[in-house]
């Protein structure tokens, strides 16, 4: 009877599943075309010293402009890119763009570029050498690059893939590339991974920043605890998604050294970077 019910369920859901599969296939095809047509672009968002407002890094954030003018956010296509085996190509494109941009500002501004990397990309056997080759092509020192990985990336990179990923991170770190743990606090086994992986930067997920707006001190205690973890590990912490002056003030009080969010600056196209970097902070604040 259970088998029968199961069968019925499959029949019942099949049109919806077929539709989902179609949408997936369509998305996959247009993503392939987008990569070929260079319709994937990168925006750059400052990560700043929370006291001075000075940028210390720019995070590369991928955008997909479709032919009909829509802007598809990465949350809607990175997973598909992973599934159809396109994420390594997409990731390479982002790394090339981001390092090309970084080389336009690096001589004058000591500001790193921070690039998000997915699980597949990280466990591709040539990842570390690809990254080092790209840096050399751009004449950029490895210290100019930060690689952002999420805890999920490490969980997904289990077994042999996980070992490849760990080797890649170790090899890059030995050369001076810094590793940031992104969206910290939202994944599984956060602490276990932190214990095993040597890291350089901890990025507190925006959901924790948002709790600073709730009444009571629970949000502050949580953020404070994560900041404490960062300082025990000897790594600086970035608060993500800082949207208000009040959040920034609370974070300063709690001793958070770095921040990223609309309150400081929105992601901007590469044409705006040099202007941004050479505008004094005081002037920038009065403009925003
Ligand atoms: P993320 O790495 O945590 O990046 C921060 C996200 O927060 C970005 O979303 C950014 O636009 C957004 N953000 C920045 N400041 C604020 C703020 O004050 N308030 C709010 N509500 N949001 C803010 P975005 O650009 O949509 O990217 C989403 C995620 O997609 C990223 O999260 C990252 O995990 C992934 N992603 C982006 N670019 C790439 C890429 O090149 N490769 C890979 N594998 N993943 C990427
Ligand atoms: Mg990130
Ligand atoms: Mg994040
Ligand atoms: Mg996030």
Image (tube, helix red, strand yellow):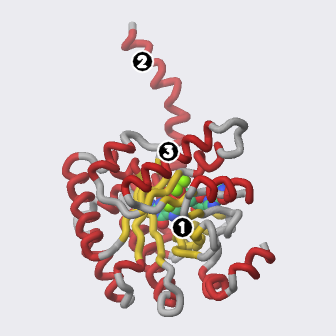
Which tag is nearer the camera, tag 2 or tag 3?
3
Residue 280 coordinates in the image, percent (x, y): 69, 84
Give above or below for 222 relative to 123.
above
Residue found farthest to the bottom: 107
Quick check: is the Cβ at mark 1 less than 8 Å away from ligand 1? yes
Is 215 displayed left or right of 200 in the figure?
right
Is 45 displayed left or right of 69 in the figure?
left
Please name the residue that numbered disc 1 is placed on. Answer: 62
Res. 6 mark: 2
Q: Earlier in the sequence, mark 3 or mark 1?
A: 1
Q: Earlier in the sequence, mark 1 or mark 2?
A: 2
Q: In the rendered image, is residue 72 in sight?
A: no
**Mark 3 element type:** helix
Mark 3 surroundings: few (<14), some (14-19) or many (≥20) residues within 10 A: few
Please name the residue that numbered disc 3 is placed on. Answer: 225
At a point 66% along the width and 82% down the height, the residue shown is 276
**Mark 1 element type:** strand
At a point 47% along the width and 77% down the height, the residue shown is 112
């Amino acid at each position: 009877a259970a088998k029968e019910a199961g069968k019925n369920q499959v029949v019942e859901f099949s049109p919806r599943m077929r539709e989902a599969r179609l949408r997936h296939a369509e998305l996959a095809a247009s993503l392939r075309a987008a990569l070929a047509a260079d319709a994937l672009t990168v925006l750059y968002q400052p990560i700043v010293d929370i006291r001075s407002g000075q940028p210390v890094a720019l995070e590369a954030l991928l955008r997909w402009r479709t032919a009909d003018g829509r802007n598809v956010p990465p949350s809607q296509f990175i997973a598909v890119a992973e599934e159809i085996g396109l994420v390594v190509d997409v990731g390479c494109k982002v790394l090339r763009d981001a390092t090309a941009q970084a080389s336009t500002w690096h001589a004058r501004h000591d500001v790193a570029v921070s690039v998000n990397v997915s699980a597949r990309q990280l466990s591709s056997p040539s990842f570390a050498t690809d990254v080092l080759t790209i840096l050399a092509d751009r004449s950029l020192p490895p210290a100019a690059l930060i690689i952002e990985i999420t805890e999920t990336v490490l969980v997904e990179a289990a077994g042999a893939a996980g070992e490849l990923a760990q080797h890649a991170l170790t090899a890059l770190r030995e050369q001076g590339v810094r590793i940031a743990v992104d969206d910290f606090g939202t994944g599984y086994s956060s602490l276990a991974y932190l214990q095993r992986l040597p890291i350089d930067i901890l990025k507190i997920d925006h959901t924790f920043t948002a709790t600073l707006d709730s009444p009571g001190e629970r949000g502050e205690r949580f953020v404070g605890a994560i900041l404490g973890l960062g300082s025990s590990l000897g790594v600086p912490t970035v608060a993500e998604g800082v949207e208000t002056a009040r959040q920034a003030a609370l974070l300063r009080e709690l001793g958070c050294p770095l921040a990223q969010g609309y309150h400081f600056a929105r992601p901007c196209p590469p044409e705006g970077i040099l202007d941004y970097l050479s505008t004094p902070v005081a002037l920038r604040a009065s403009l925003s």
